[in-house]
Image: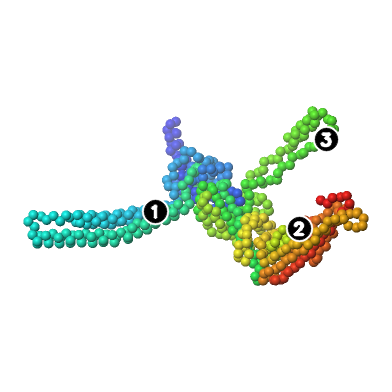
Amino acid sequence: MRAFLAVLLAFTALPACADTIAATSRITAVTVYPEGARLTREVTFSVPSAGSHELLVTDLPSDSDPGMIRLAPSESLRLGAFNLRADRLPPREDPLTEDQKAAKARIEAAQTAADTAQLALEAVTARVEAAEAQVRFLSSFSGALPDGATPETIRAMAGMIGAETLAVRQAALAAKADLPAAQKAVTEAQEALVRAQAAYDALPSADMDYAALSVAVTAQEAGEATVTITQYVGNASWQPVYDLNLTRKGGDRLTLDRSVLVTQHTDEDWDGVALTLSSARPSEQAAPSQLWPELRSIWPEDAPEGLARKSRGDADMAMMEAPVSETAPSVTAGVALEGDTVVYNYPVPVTVAAGAEDLRLALDSLDFVPVVQAVAVPRLDRTAFVMASFTNASDEPLLPGQAMLLREGVLAGQTWLDVVAPGVETKVGFGALETLRVKREMPKRAGGQTGIFVSANRQSESAVITVENTGAEAWPVRILDQVPYSEQDDLEIAVTASPKVTETDVDGQRGILAWDFALPAGARQTITLEQVLTWPEGMVLR
């Protein structure tokens, strides 16, 4: 029997022993939503042999959610179960990126150059100090003569001391002459070291707290394989920003330059990724809210409290027994909160450092033909304001965002631009027009009784509105004012205006009046407005 088993085992192919393959991932593409982001990672690794193995991806963020991870293998690979490991992680050989490795080598070279320059400076300083010590020694000679000294020996000694002192002083001067160059070399080397360190610090880092993704893989053959990881994360966002420039020279024109601000705090830098910006909101409500039945009942005023309490209890029970809506299905990135999803694909790879910057990217520029008016409310303001209305003629909505307002290229203010759907008109204010002055005066205001017989009360009010164009440019002007309105037949309101009102009940608001007219440069326009209110005796006007 044992011999039979030995022969059987000898001719039976056994499965290869499972290997643990450690690998790292690279973020290749990112889709950013107004809240959150979808990261696409590629893990490329070498499979040592056909069969089952464990792939251990060692560089996922520590707060990764396994429920928000999806995997896709290359053709020669089949995936099994996977899990995230936060403890008992294998050590990573080197968490530095290739750019960081190169930058670190430059730091080491700069440090060596700085050390060499410092040593050269210290050598020059030592020469100076040695020469100065010799000068001090020769200068300290007291002049005592040796026994039996002759004039010749004295002259020889004096000459020797003088020659040595001169030589030493010349050596000191030569050493001091070398000091500036040595000091400059040290300064330049230290500055180069600082720049190299700053360049290293600015690079996206791979050194962070991480979790390891353990994946069971089965390979058909040995060789290179790839696993694509799709991961949804929070702490990332984008928002549109606009520059709106209104020009009138050569015809009214409104140019809208669109940009976006991208921010992420995922503790992981996005280095050279393909960036997509989506208006979908997968983190927000995806289904309509639930309405609950509301049971109301009436009872006699003298009904016992217990009966009323029972009624309320029945109503509460009816609410509890109302059918509960099913949980909304998992939200996917393709679902937009309103209308169609707008997607922007940035044409070149970008880098977004975690928590370090708001990356601003230019999208495109749109041109509109606006309707421009100088709009004034003399009752409240002393000048007119430039207003431009335009229709979104593009095929996509303008998403809400902050807008800088420019008039003829000069900053005029800022505003918040609400969403503008295709085909919808919107109005934007472009600041005060100081050359258009308005004034509202009330030369007459009276209140009292009229008629021989006191049968009614009366109140009248007159106003004179003056608009003056002190500039060198003609403007289409719109003046807004108001008069009271009544919903009672007994309160009569008579309004007269000159010139005639262009529009009444502006924007559906009762009693709001508008005058539209062209005002040439240097011209003035006067509007008179009178209102008379009458009501029966014994009534009070409110």
| Residue 230 position in % (x across, y down) | 56, 48
Q: Which residue position is annotated with label 2?
A: 507
Residue at x 85% of width, y 55% of height? 448
- Asked if residue 70 shows in the view, the reply is no
Q: Which residue position is annotated with label 1?
A: 107
Vertical arrangement, residue 164 with respect to residue 34, above or below: below
**Is disc 3 placed on a helix, strand or loop?**
loop
**Is disc 2 placed on a helix, strand or loop?**
helix
Mark 1 crowdedness (10 Å alpha carbons): few <14, some 14-19, many ≥20: many
Mark 3 crowdedness (10 Å alpha carbons): few <14, some 14-19, many ≥20: few
Residue at x 75% of width, y 68% of height? 525
Q: Out of 515 and 43, give the one closest to the viewer.
A: 515
Question: Which amino acid, mark 1?
Answer: Ile
The numbered disc on residue 126 is: none
Question: Which amino acid, mark 2?
Answer: Asp
Q: Residue furthest left?
A: 148
Tell me the mark number nearer the camera, choosing from 3 and 2: 2
| Residue 451 position in % (x across, y down) | 90, 58
Tell me the mark number nearer the camera, choosing from 3 and 1: 3
Q: Out of 29 and 77, give the one closest to the viewer.
A: 29
Task: Of the two numbered discs 3 and 1 on the same chain, state the one appearing first in sequence.
Answer: 1
Question: Which amino acid, mark 3?
Answer: Ile
- Asked if residue 148 shows in the view, the reply is yes
**Is disc 1 placed on a helix, strand or loop?**
helix
Task: Of the two numbered discs 3 and 2 on the same chain, state the one appearing first in sequence.
Answer: 3
Vertical arrangement, residue 232 with respect to residue 166, above or below: above
Q: How far is disc 2 from disc 1 in space, using C-alphas?
A: 67 Å
Residue at x 57% of width, y 49% of height? 236
Q: Which residue position is annotated with label 3?
A: 298
